[in-house]
Each structure stands twice: as structure tokens, then as C-alpha cells.
Amino acid sequence: MPSDPPTICRERGRLLREYSDAATNYAESVREMAELAIAGHETQSNAARRLCRAAWDTAENSRIALSRHEADHSCDRAGESRSVEDVDSL
């Protein structure tokens, strides 16, 4: 049916959620680092910068894992798929 939502495999759904969470964490780290730097708390902003880099590394690794999965896997296999609407429940 054309109106049925698209389906994706469980692993892709898991990787999407992991990437989303990592990207959100990175964005929060950047915000916190910027607030500290703007407030002139240089020592604290340097520590936050290191945490920010670690969060970026995690987000980048998650992005790469998702990209590899999408390149290597056909996500429309029957029996392993779930509705895009169900991804949030993973």
C-alpha cells in the first residue's frame, strides 16, 4: 500500500537512535562550553572543550557506524523490519 509507512531494520533503527543521542549530547556539550567561555571561565571552558571533543568523537563514530550499515545492508528485508514510527521505541 502506498500509504504504509516505510520500514527499516532493527539494527538501522538502533544505530539511528544511537547517532541521535550522541549528536544531542555533543550539541549540549558545545552549548555548555560556549557558555563557560563567554562567561570568562577559561579553566572550566578548557575542561569542557575536552569533554566536547569526546562527545564529538562518539557522535562521529555513531555516524560512521550508521553510514556503514546503510552502505552494506539492505534494510528492507521482511521479518527484520519495523515501521519508522516504531523507531523511538527501540
Image (spheres, helix red, strand yellow):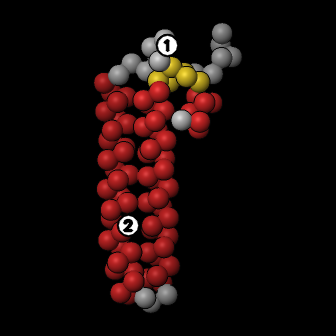
- For the residue pair 58 and 27, the one nearer the viewer reads as 58
Spot occupied by residue 2 in the image (x, y as percentages of width and height) = 65, 13
Q: How many neighbours does mark 1 have within 10 angstroms: few (below 14), some (14-19), or many (20 or more)? A: few
- Is 3 drawn above or below residue 34 in the view shown? above
| Quadrant housing residue 70 | top left
Considering every residue shown, the one lying at the far right of the view is 3
Report helix, strand or loop for mark 2.
Answer: helix
Mark toward the start of the polypeptide (2 vs 1): 2
Q: Residue at x 49, y 87 (%)?
A: 39
Label ID, residue 29: none
Spot occupied by residue 54 in the image (x, y as percentages of width and height) = 32, 62
Q: Label 1, on which residue?
A: 79
- Is 57 drawn above or below residue 69 in the view shown? below
- Is 32 drawn above or below residue 68 in the view shown? below
Spot occupied by residue 20 in the image (x, y as percentages of width and height) = 49, 47
Q: Residue at x 34, y 80 (%)?
A: 46
State how many labels appear: 2
Q: Residue at x 36, y 68 (%)?
A: 51
Q: Residue at x 44, y 75 (%)?
A: 33
Q: Label 2, on which residue?
A: 52
Q: Quadrant of the N terminus?
A: top right
Considering every residue shown, the one lying at the far bottom of the view is 40
Q: Quadrant of the C terminus?
A: top right
Foreground mark, 2 or 1? 1
- Relative side of 2 to 64, left or right: right
The residue type indicated by label 1 comes to Gly
The residue type indicated by label 2 comes to Cys
- Relative side of 33 to 53, left or right: right
Considering every residue shown, the one lying at the far front of the view is 90
Spot occupied by residue 76 in the image (x, y as percentages of width and height) = 46, 16
Report helix, strand or loop for mark 1.
Answer: loop
